[in-house]
Image (spheres, rainbow, N blue to C red):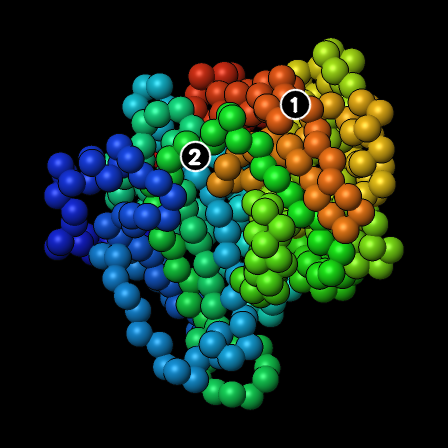
């Protein structure tokens, strides 16, 4: 199935686009086009259409507005040294999108169809891909229930859409993230939707995010729903703990128990850290072990990782059990080494030994 392409008749003029791409921010500007693809239970997937970015019109009784049947992805296209553009592990996003759909009772989009739409949009809007290290085109695929009706059941219609926004390097090495470990709210329990990338998980997290902000924190750290002690993840990112220092350091991350979102950045760092010669471990770490590990000096660095920010150092942790700080408030040496290695692979300045990059143009 190929994508039907109807170029925009009112694309942003070159000079204005270049100005925007030079200082992109995040989610501030959207590219000239989007992709839309309809699914119905009767006919399956239609032909995806690439067309001018524009508002859409939906019936007020469309099911997504009432029961929240919605999923999304986040992925990036990076400018390469030769001027070409490449996507980072797009098959991993296609696979996760299918798994999220299955959990939310939305139709599973074939990987090839998903990848074809991403390819088409990046090609069409190539002029929106920034050039500098750390900058990228952030791509947001999403899907939601469009059947009209208030009966509670899986929708028999869905709309898949794809939009893109140029993203700046919003990493500030002087600013480690301060986190609030929430003992009041729960993000996910076994059997729930923690593993699915769905809007509903985020809707349920916002009140905790607001509580964190009230405590002067940038992000929420979630602990498990049952024992209320095991560290799971941070906001929309996974967490890593560095134990020890130098060549003998261990890079540790909470294991995927069924309630964590299986991050593609998390997965990539397991490989990158091993490639760099570190010992890599997935396991359980409790709030107490975090606090004690920092106090004894065993835990030397902490960072969060995800597609949007790639790697962000975590400094201060606050919770009902106290406040403690990792390191000296500056990003750790190993944190920066992992960040720079991953960014180097993404920008084509470091050998892509795992064949993660897929050239688009
Ligand atoms: C998307 C997401 C992540 C990070 O996943 P990446 O594939 O690395 O971007 C982590 N946690 C949550 C809750 C997420 O939604």
Estimate how packed mark 1 is, as few (under 14), some (14 to 19) or many (20 or more) residues with alpha carbons within 10 Å. Answer: few
Observer-nearest residue: 210 or 190?
Answer: 210
Residue 99 pos. (x, y %): 62, 56
Q: Quadrant of residue 40?
A: bottom left
Gap between marks 1 and 2, in whole Å? 21 Å
Observer-nearest residue: 30 or 323?
Answer: 323
- Label 2: element kind: loop
Marking on residue 230? none
Estimate how packed mark 2 is, as few (under 14), some (14 to 19) or many (20 or more) residues with alpha carbons within 10 Å. Answer: some
User: Of the residues under marks 1 and 2, which one precedes in the sequence?
Assistant: 2
Residue 216 pos. (x, y %): 59, 47
Q: What residue is rendered at 80% in x and 36% in y?
A: 290
Q: Is residue 311 left or right of residue 4?
A: right
Quarter holding the C terminus? top left
Q: Quadrant of residue 242?
A: top right
Front of the two marks 1 and 2:
1
Answer whether residue 357 is visible to the viewer in this image: no
Residue 154 pos. (x, y %): 57, 77
Q: Is 315 placed above or below 286 here?
A: above
Observer-nearest residue: 55 or 174?
Answer: 174
**The CB of the residue at mark 1 lies under 8 Å from ligand 1:** no
Query: Circle 1 sits on which residue?
Result: 328
Quarter holding the N terminus? bottom left
Marking on residue 170? 2
């Amino acid at each position: 199935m190929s994508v039907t392409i109807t170029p925009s008749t009112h694309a942003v003029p070159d000079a204005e686009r270049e100005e925007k791409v030079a200082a992109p921010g995040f989610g501030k500007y959207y590219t000239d086009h989007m992709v839309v693809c309809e699914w119905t239970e009767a006919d399956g997937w239609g032909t995806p259409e690439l067309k001018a970015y524009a508002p859409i019109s939906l019936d007020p009784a469309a099911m997504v507005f009432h029961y929240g049947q919605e999923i999304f992805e986040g992925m990036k296209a990076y400018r390469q040294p030769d001027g070409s553009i490449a996507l980072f592990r797009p098959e991993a996003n296609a696979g996760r999108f299918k798994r999220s759909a299955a959990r939310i009772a939305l139709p599973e989009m074939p990987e090839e169809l998903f990848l074809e739409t991403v390819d088409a949009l990046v090609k069409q809007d190539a002029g929106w891909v920034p050039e500098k290290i750390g900058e990228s085109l952030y791509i947001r695929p999403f899907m939601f229930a469009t059947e009209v009706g208030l009966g509670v059941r899986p929708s028999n219609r869905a709309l898949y859409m794809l939009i893109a926004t140029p993203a700046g390097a919003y990493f500030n090495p002087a600013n480690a993230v301060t986190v609030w470990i929430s003992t009041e709210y729960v993000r996910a329990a076994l059997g729930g939707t923690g593993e699915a990338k769905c809007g509903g998980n985020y809707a349920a997290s916002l009140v905790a995010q607001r509580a964190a902000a009230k405590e002067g924190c940038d992000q929420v750290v979630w602990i498990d729903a049952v024992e209320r002690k095991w560290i799971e993840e941070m906001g929309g990112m996974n967490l890593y703990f560095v134990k020890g220092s130098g060549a003998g350091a261990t890079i540790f991350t909470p294991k995927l128990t069924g309630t964590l979102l299986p991050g593609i950045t998390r997965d990539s760092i397991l490989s990158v850290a091993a490639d760099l010669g570190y010992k890599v471990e997935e396991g359980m770490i409790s709030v107490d072990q975090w606090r004690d590990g920092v106090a004894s000096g065993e835990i030397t660095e902490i960072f969060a990782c995800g597609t949007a920010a790639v790697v962000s150092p975590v400094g201060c942790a606050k919770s009902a059990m106290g406040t403690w700080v990792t390191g000296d408030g500056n990003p750790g040496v190993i944190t920066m080494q992992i960040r720079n290695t991953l960014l180097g692979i993404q920008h084509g300045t470091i050998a892509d030994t795992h064949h993660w990059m897929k050239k688009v143009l």
